Amino acid sequence: MISSEQAVPASRLIQKNKKENHRIFFWFRLLLKSKTGTIGFVIMSIVIFTALFAPWLAPYDPSEQHITDMLAPPFWLDGGSMQYVLGTDNLGRDLLSRIIYGSQVSLVVGLFAIIVAGAIGLSIGLIAGYYGGWLDNVFMRLVDSFLAIPNILFTLVILKVTGPGMFTLIVVLGVTNWVVYARVIRSEVLSLKEREFVRAAKSIGVRDGMIMIRHLLPNVFSSFCVLGTLSMATTIISEASLSFLGLGIQPPTISWGGMLSTGREYLATNWGLATFPGIAITITTLGIIFLGDWLRDIFDPRSQDI
């Protein structure tokens, strides 16, 4: 026999599962209703799948050189063949394989850079907004100082001093992009800390750190996710730009920006070397932006009526 005390937790578990299933179904409905969200989801699913399974999807080793087939055009142009679908570069390396492997670098740099930027900006935004006063003034003047310096100039100086590399690039891009998170989170916390649930928590002696983690953080997390998704697109473009200038990802590591840098010398004779990596960057960033629009719809309270 099952006692009534044992039956209550089971019923609550069933209700919790029903709510979670309803939430997932609700998100899926919003995805289907949003054309841009559906396109973004499909694009990013393909990009992530390509990055994860690059060794099995790439037809060749991306660093393997075929000297006799240098600068081969795409298969649909005169002189092209299905052996190299998108052609080869100046060293005879398969362009399609290099684009597939390049997706790994873009996603890794973009993801970890926004984690660094988000962690810094979220922490500063929570502390500055919650405590206010002189601490808020100090943090906001720090934000103003970062905004006064052009990001690209600050990034170039740091990379020139420390030297290029993937880890350095991730840290630099994270450090230069945290100010947006800090300003957005701070503005929301300034409003939330005057709400009754925060005052009630203070009145019963809940510590400030616990209030920020358990009460304020969940309420600003939606804005944080949307902002992080959208800023990932700009981070990927920044990585490609720095690699194009020779200050980002260094050979033999493959990056779309580095491929663009190599291809610019052959625009007149083999436009595909620069065009195809550029298309890959454009499609990926559009997919992230479209996915960010879908996330914004999910966290919009007005969408609950759908």
Image (tube, rainbow, N blue to C red):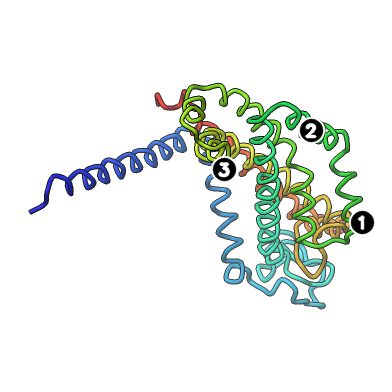
Can residue 36 be seen here? The reply is: no
Residue drawn at (79%, 33%) of the image: 138
Residue 28 percent location from the top left of the image: 42, 40
> Where is residue 41 drawn, in percent x and y?
53, 45
The residue identified by callout 2 is 138
State the SS at label 3.
Answer: helix
The CA span between labels 2 and 1 is 29 Å
* Circle 3 crowding by C-alpha within 10 Å: few under 14, some 14–19, many from 20: many
Residue 122 visible, this orientation: yes
Q: Earlier in the sequence, mark 2 or mark 1?
A: 2
Q: Which residue is mark 1?
A: 160
- Position of the N terminus, as image quadrant, is bottom left
Which quadrant of the view contains residue 243? Answer: bottom right
The residue mark sitting in front, 1 or 3, is 1
**Quarter of the picture holding the C terminus:** top left
Residue drawn at 66 percent across, 30 percent down? 131
